[in-house]
Amino acid sequence: MSLAQKKETLIEELTILPDPQERFAYLIDRARNAPGLEAEYQIETFRIEGCQSNLWLVPSFEGGLCQFRVDSDAVITKGVAGLLAELYSDCPPEEILQHPPEFLSEVGITQHLTPNRRNGLSNVWKKIEGYAELCLKNQGASA
């Protein structure tokens, strides 16, 4: 599934719920059911700065596709960051760079986050974007 298709699916899932509180309840349920990170990955190297709670993003690159895993000690943070990890995983870096996560404001997620959580979410995107740029650069160097 392309990134654009994954984004449309997420938008559909989120806009079915008309109330912002219902959307957050949905994200919290998703976070509770999502796998966490092993303790060996919950380290400063993978920690996202600027977030009130602890939030970790672990990137990897396999077969020309980026992968992202997240965990947090706050379920809402894990849920929102998990949306981005899910959206951008299994995508080539150039596709990631062409699709910043503006859809989160379109579906009313960012407007209902505290400033600290918005900042953390912005930093998650910056890490994903930076990792995609690095993978793209390394692909060009090895070609």
Image (cartoon, rainbow, N blue to C red):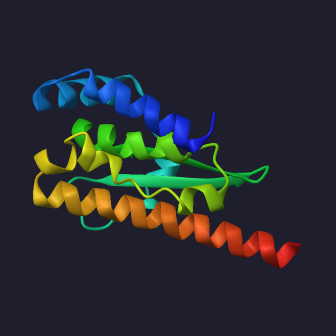
Residue 98, x across and y down, in percent = 54, 61
Residue 101, x across and y down, in percent = 39, 53
Name the one closer to the observer, 126 or 38: 126
How many numbered circles does the render carry?
A: 0
Question: Which residue is depicted at the point 60% across and 71% down?
Answer: 133
Question: Which residue is depicted at the point 56% across and 43% down?
Answer: 3
Furthest toward the right, the residue is 143
Q: Is residue 120 left or right of residue 111?
A: right
Q: Is residue 19 left or right of residue 96?
A: left
Asked whether residue 78 appears in the rendered view, the answer is yes
Q: Quadrant of residue 83?
A: top left
Q: Quadrant of residue 120?
A: bottom left
Asked whether residue 48 appears in the rendered view, the answer is no
Residue 12, x across and y down, in percent = 36, 26
Quadrant showing the N terminus: top right
Quadrant showing the C terminus: bottom right
In the depicted structure, whether residue 68 falls above or below residue 5: below
Q: Quadrant of residue 78?
A: top left
In the depicted structure, whether residue 100 falls above or below residue 67: below
Question: Which residue is depicted at the point 44% across and 45% down?
Answer: 70
